Amino acid sequence: MAFRSLHQIRALHRTAQISESSHLLGSARSYASGISTVPELYCRNKGHGALPWTHGSSITLRSAMAVELPIFLNYTRLLSTQVKAPAQARQMGALKVAMLSPGFIYEPYTPREKISFLKRWFTRSGWRRTKEDIVLELKSAYAITKLRKKGYSKNLFYKEAIQLYKEINTLMANGDKNSLRKAVTEKMFSELKNEIKQRDSIWNKVYWEMVEPVVKIRTLRARLIGVDRNDLEKVFIQLTLEFLTKQKFEAYDSNGSIVSGDKSKEVLVRDIWVFEKSLFHDKAFWRLCGRISL
């Protein structure tokens, strides 16, 4: 009897161990399946009047990769902040940082069609148009207010924008891709690089000069782009500027003969450029992110 009782106790003990092991194995599987689903960031414009935010869909990873995910994400963030500053910034003795650009222009500027006073105030379509105009202006005012909290000065920014405008055009004329990469966003660099390649297939060399001072510069639009729906301070700002300048241009073939333009004549040129900067890093600097053709 004693032997049988001892045998039953051992059997019960083994059953308890198996049950506990199964429970632990099930918990481990649940934990693995829980961490194998991670968010994938993508850009999305949510509604007409709302700011674009990054949302998360889900992608399934193997449980072995889930442990490596935080390291990978940290490395990605590190790459997005460790970008060399342009020569202009290094000469100032301060390290400036360029964050990875969202890669698009939010609500590109288009001129508004003029309407008469009577139509604006005495028709329903005029009231609707007035409301739309007010909303557009309020968006720009809000973005500028946000920018001023970071020490923005319109006069100082205009001086910097004119310098960037002149510098980028000069780099384009000289075909200096390495320096150009630091003054523009990633997508813009790809477009300008293709333009240089296409131009070099037609002309051997070009001459470009901007006659100073500029005739006119003004801000047409200001917009904010959010990159974190849980942190409203993590935003990029885009300022759309109109440049009216006098320029000189001349193009040469492989023999040095003039094939286009005349550098002895000044031509009035109107350009609309969009500059971008991150507001969630104190040492970020302005870069060209797009050009608008009307």
Image (tube, rainbow, N blue to C red):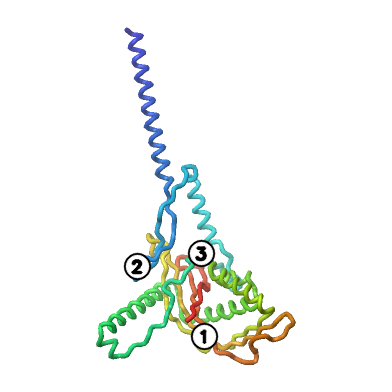
Marks 3 and 2, the one that precedes in the sequence: 2
Helix, strand or loop under label 1: strand
Disc 1/disc 2 C-alpha distance (Å):
32 Å
* Residue sticking out furthest to the right: 255
SS class of the residue under badge 2? loop
Q: Which badge, 1 or 2, is on the more N-terminal residue?
A: 2
**Residue contact between numbered discs 3 and 1, judged by CB atoms under 8 Å:** no
In this image, 144 relative to 290: left or right?
left
Q: Nearer the viewer, mark 3 or mark 2?
A: 2
Q: Nearer the viewer, residue 256 or 36?
A: 256
Please say if 213 is above or below 185: below
> Callout 1, which amino acid?
Arg
User: Label 3 amino acid?
Assistant: Leu
Residue 113: image quadrant is bottom left
Residue 93 appears anywhere in the view: no
Residue 65 percent across, percent down from the top left: 49, 45
Q: CA distance from mark 3 to mark 1?
A: 29 Å
Which disc is residue 270 wearing?
1
How many C-alpha atoms fall within 10 Å of the one at disc 3: few (<14), some, or many (≥20)? some
Question: Which residue carries the number 3 mark?
Answer: 100
Place of residue 152 in the rendered image (x, y in percent of width and height, measured from the top left):
45, 76
User: What numbered label is drawn on residue 47?
Assistant: 2
Dot 2 alpha-carbon crowd within 10 angstroms: few under 14, some 14 to 19, many 20 or more: few
- How far apart are the two marked residues, 3 and 2, measured between alpha carbons? 24 Å
- The x and y percentages for residue 71 are 51, 50
